[in-house]
Amino acid sequence: MLQASDFRRLIIVVFSATLFGWAIDDITLALLIALSLYSLWLHRNISQLLNWIRYRKNQEAPDLPGVFEDLCREMDYSRERHRKRKKKLGSYLKQFQLATRALPDGTVVLDERGTVTWANKAAQTYLGIRWPDDAGQRITNLIRLPEIAEFVDENKRLSSIDIASPTNPDIHLNVRITPYGNAQRLFVARDVTQLHRANRIRRDFVANVSHELRTPITVLRGYLENMSSQREQCPPAWQKALGQMLEHVARMQSIVEDLLVLSKLEQGDEIEHLEVVSVASLIADIQRESQLLKTRYEHMFALEVDTSLEIFGSPKELHSCFSNLVYNAIHYSGKSKIIEIRWYQDESGAHFAVKDNGVGIAQQHLARLTERFYRVDTARDRSQGGTGLGLAIVKHVLTRHGGSLHIESELGKGSTFRCDFPLKSIVAPEVPEEIDRSA
Ligand code: ADP
C-alpha cells in the first residue's frame, strides 16, 4: 500500500514540476521529465531490493525509503520465521534419525522401485545393508534371496515372511513391508530367533511325546480289543468299562496319530519331492474308503470332477487333507445327506470344494476352526470321534502346497470348505481357446 510519505513525495514532485513548467511555459514537458526521473528513482530502489532478496540474504536490509522500507521489514520477518522453522524441523529430523537408528529392528526405507533411500544400523547387522554406502541400490541386489525378490515385488499377497539372516544363518528374521507416504515403503526385519527356537522346542516336544505314547497306546488297544473279543468271560461290571476304555484308547490313538502327522508337516515349509497328483483318483479312493461309514450315515456323494486336472504335490498329504474335509462333511451332516464334491479349475487356479447341508457353523467360529483342538461344540464334536486336529492338518498341507482354505458356512444350513491351489500348481494348465468373434 502506498504510504503517506510516498504520497507526499509524489505530490511534491508533481507540484514542483508544474511550477517549473509554468515558469518555462511548458507544463507537459516539465511533468514528463519529473515523472521520468521519479520512475528512474523507483526503478533504482526496486533493483536494490531485488538485489538484496536474491544475493544478499545474510546481509542487513538496504536503507530504502517509504514502502520499500516496509517491504524490507516484511521480508526480514518472514526470513527469520523460515529460518526458525527450518531449524526446528532439522532438530526434529535429527531426533527422528537418532531414534530410528537406535531401533533394534533392521529398518530400510525403499522408494517405489525398491531402491534403498535410508537404512539404520541394525539393517547392517541383520541384512548386511550399509548406510550410506548402499544408497540407491535395489534391495533385491543387496539381499539375493528369491523369497525377498518375490516379497518386495508383490508385498500385498503376504503380510510377512520368515527368512534366515543373510549375514548370519543362525539368526531368523521376520520381514514386513509397510507402504507409507508417496509410494515409499518401510522394510522392517525383526530378529525372531528366540521365538523360532521356542517353536522348535514345542514342536519337538509334541513330536517326542506323541512318538513315546504311540507304542503303549497301541499295546493297550491290542489288549483291550483282545479282552473285548472275549467279553463273556469278563465279570458284568467290567463289560461296560471295557467298552468305554476301548473307545477312549481309540480316540487317544487318533490324537497321537494326528499329532504325529502335524509334527511331520511342520518340519519343513515346502514339500521335498513334488509329484503329479491325480486328484480325481484321490477322490475315488476317499469315496471308496468312506463306504465304511455308509451304514451309520447313509450319505450320498454328488461329484463334479475334472478328471484331466492334475496338480503338483504330495499325494499322501493331499489325501489326508481332502479326506479330512470329506469325513467332516459326513460326520457333521446328519443322516442321509448329499455331500457335493467339486474339483475344478478357473482363472485363479485349481479348487477342491466339499459342500454339505449339515449343521453349519456360526460366523464367530470360522476364523478359529483351523486352530489345534478348536471345536465348535466340544461335547457334540467329541462324540463324532473327532480329534480337533483335522482342519489344522488341512491348513498345514495347503500352506505347504502354496494354497489356502476358504470356509463358508451358515448355521443350520450347511458348510462349504474350499481348498484353493495357485495356477503354478497345475500340471500343464490349459490355455483357454480364443473364440474367433469375427467369424
Ligand atoms: P474334528 O476332528 O473335531 O472334526 P476338525 O479340526 O476337523 O476337528 O474340525 C474342527 C471343528 O470344526 C469340528 O470340531 C467341528 O465343530 C467343526 N466342523 C468341521 N467341519 C465341519 C462341517 N463340515 N460342518 C460343521 N462343523 C464342522
Image (cartoon, grey):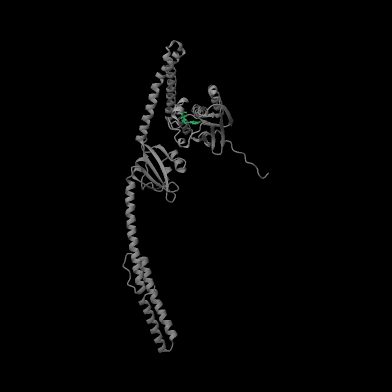
Q: Quadrant of the C terminus?
A: top right
Work out which residue is located at the far top of the displayed protein and give it.
233
Q: Position of residue 360 (x, y in %)?
A: 50, 33
Quadrant placement of the N terminus = bottom left
Q: Position of residue 182 (x, y in %)?
A: 43, 51
Residue 380 in the image, given as x and y percentages of width and height = 46, 28
Q: What residue is shown at x 41% (from left), y 87% (from top)?
A: 21
Residue 238 shows in the view: yes
Q: Is residue 271 visible?
A: no
Give coordinates of residue 97: x percent, y percent. 34, 49
Give above or below for 17 relative to 400.
below
420 relative position to 198: left or right: right
* Residue 426, quarter of picture: top right
* Residue toward you, 30 or 300: 300
Q: Please report the residue visible at 39 percent of the width from the left and 43 percent of the height from the top.
A: 188
From this viewpoint, which residue is outermost toward the right?
439
Residue 241, placed above or below residue 127: above
Q: Up-down: is 104 above or below 314? A: below
Q: Is residue 133 above or below residue 227?
A: below
